[in-house]
């Protein structure tokens, strides 16, 4: 029993996890009959006649996502009400029975095509819980139905970057609780979409534990393997048809990967976190929430805590009854993108001289962390767990953000660090941190200096840094005004 820190550092991401992590920020799109009934959960009795967006334009959704700097989009192809946004041959409860595009439409196709055209990755949400389908609860029969639908989606719409499953589960009309055959679902995905991560109720991407935008101070990507089954447990998922989920903080465990946790684990895996939340209180569009769109400063804060906290950021944007992302949300996303581009547009350490206290070889010398290249990195030799990296900015600069990235292909290793600046010949610490992982955005009050030093004081085996970037976001923001 127990895994050592060195053993944990050997665990690395799969190539699909690596590709997914690099997307950083992407959209959830919740859209179905609920948009027209003003509900969060449909009960499956909704008539397909209700589904009739008057002005649907997937290109607008994609443009909105791109304007904010998002790299992908996940569409609710079927939510709990069972209504399919594509003309599934396994049910009539779909767009084919709706007045939209006279029953000839295929929204999954329109959205996946729009994504491809605009260079966004496309992913699918498919709810296993289906409140319309009569076979639900007759486990084998429903599992076959579900696999048929899943197969349509994973074979008919090009490459997917993600299949997103939640664990919601209920009783079928026969009064029996459905038992999902997760392993069979995973096999279908792996065989047709080997590049797609399976998220939440899946082996590749971990739900951060809440939908309120709460983030952990320390988010490990190497965690006990037992967490892989966590969200399959129905008690952990949304329990009621309301918006209270967006205020609740579940899964309170703050520490999932420290040495203390490792010492109690049987096995650890690479299982990185995704933070999902909605730009409005609900997942689906409700007119009465038009004035409750999160503000740009709130979203910047979320971005810095999620993407900058070794997680990815999955932000929901619900299209309205026209089939468009509402102006308030669209304008906010555009302003968010503009703000992030301003804040993170000018890396003051790009190409800066960086000197390491120790490095494994010339190939991994300190300046590899400031060369702006994603595939080069600084690392020390084996068993050198404490090291510093000094960066010369050339002239005195004002800074308030430092972005650090580990070369996670070699595992997640840094456990504790602080950052110092040279002030009249003296090194002074101004920031203390714990993990880094794929990306850590260190936010602090502006300091002035021409030299900083990253001091890694605890790590697993040896530390690496693939990137050190330095920004003065406040000045960039002020320049704009
Ligand atoms: C939950 C669902 O119950 C919500 O309606 C929403 O789709 C959210 C992302 O997942 O489990």
Image (cartoon, rainbow, N blue to C red):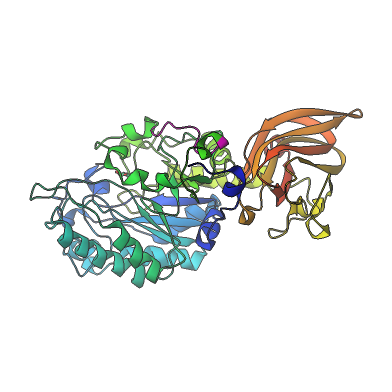
Q: In which image quadrant can residue 75 be found?
A: bottom left
Q: Locate residue 127, reporting x and y percent.
A: 28, 53
Q: Locate residue 372, reporting x and y percent.
A: 74, 55
Q: In which image quadrant can residue 458 be found?
A: top right
Q: Locate residue 98, reporting x and y percent.
A: 19, 61
Q: Is residue 39 magenta?
A: no
**In the visual, does 433 lie left or right of 239?**
right
Residue at left offset 24%, top offset 54%: 180
Q: Locate residue 391, reporting x and y percent.
A: 82, 43
**In the visual, does 76 lie left or right of 459?**
left
Total marks shown come to: 0
Viewer-closest of 180 and 444: 180
* Residue farthest along the right direction in this orientation: 425
Viewer-closest of 145 and 31: 145
Which part of the image, by quadrant, shows the C terminus? top right
Residue at left offset 66%, top offset 53%: 407
- Magenta part of the chain: 250-259
**In the visual, does 132 lie left or right of 223?**
left
Viewer-closest of 90 and 360: 360
Q: Work out whether residue 445 can be spotted.
A: no
Residue at left offset 43%, top offset 37%: 293
**In the visual, does 438 lie left or right of 299?**
right
Ligand 1 resides in the quarter of the picture at top left
């Amino acid at each position: 029993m127990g895994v050592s820190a060195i053993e944990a550092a050997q665990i690395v991401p799969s190539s699909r996890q690596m590709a997914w992590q690099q997307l950083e920020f992407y959209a959830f799109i919740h859209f179905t009959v609920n948009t027209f009934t003003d509900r969060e959960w449909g009960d499956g009795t909704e008539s397909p006649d209700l589904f009739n967006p008057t002005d649907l334009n997937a290109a607008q959704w994609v443009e909105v996502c791109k304007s904010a700097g998002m790299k992908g989009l996940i569409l609710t192809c079927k939510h709990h009400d069972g209504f399919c946004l594509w003309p599934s041959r396994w049910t009539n409860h779909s767009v084919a029975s709706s007045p939209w595009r006279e029953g000839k439409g295929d929204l999954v196709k329109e959205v996946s095509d729009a994504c491809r055209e605009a260079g966004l990755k496309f992913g699918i949400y498919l709810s296993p819980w289906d409140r319309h389908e009569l076979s639900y609860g007759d486990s084998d029969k429903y599992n076959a139905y579900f696999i048929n639908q899943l197969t349509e989606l994973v074979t008919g719409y090009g490459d997917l970057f993600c299949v997103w499953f939640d664990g919601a589960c209920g009783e079928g009309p026969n009064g029996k609780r459905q038992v999902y055959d997760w392993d069979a679902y995973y096999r279908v995905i792996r065989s047709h979409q080997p590049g797609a991560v399976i998220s939440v109720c899946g082996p590749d991407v971990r739900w951060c534990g809440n939908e309120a935008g709460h983030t952990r101070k320390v988010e490990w990507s190497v965690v006990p393997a037992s967490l892989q089954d966590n969200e399959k447990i129905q008690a952990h998922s949304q329990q009621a048809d309301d918006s209270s989920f967006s205020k609740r903080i579940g899964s309170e465990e703050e520490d999932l990967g420290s040495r203390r946790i490792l010492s109690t684990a049987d096995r650890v895996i690479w299982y990185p976190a995704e933070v999902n939340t909605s730009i409005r209180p609900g997942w689906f569009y409700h007119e009465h929430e038009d004035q409750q769109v999160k503000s740009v400063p709130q979203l910047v804060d979320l971005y810095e805590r999620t993407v900058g906290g070794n997680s990815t950021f999955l932000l929901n944007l619900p299209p309205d009854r026209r089939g468009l992302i509402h102006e308030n949300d669209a304008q906010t996303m555009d302003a968010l993108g503009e703000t992030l581009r301003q804040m993170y547009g000018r890396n003051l350490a790009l190409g800066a001289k960086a000197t390491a206290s120790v490095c494994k070889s010339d190939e991994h010398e300190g300046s590899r962390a400031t060369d702006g290249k994603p595939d080069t990195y600084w690392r020390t030799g084996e068993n050198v767990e404490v090291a510093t990296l000094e960066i010369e900015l050339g002239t005195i600069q004002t800074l308030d953000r430092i972005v650090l990235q580990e070369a996670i292909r070699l595992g997640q290793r840094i456990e504790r660090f602080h950052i110092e600046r040279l002030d009249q010949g003296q090194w002074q610490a101004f920031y203390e941190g714990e993990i880094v992982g794929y990306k850590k955005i260190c936010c602090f009050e502006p300091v002035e200096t021409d030299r900083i030093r990253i001091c890694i004081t605890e790590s697993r085996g040896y530390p690496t840094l693939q990137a050190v970037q330095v920004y003065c976001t406040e000045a960039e923001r002020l320049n704009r005004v």
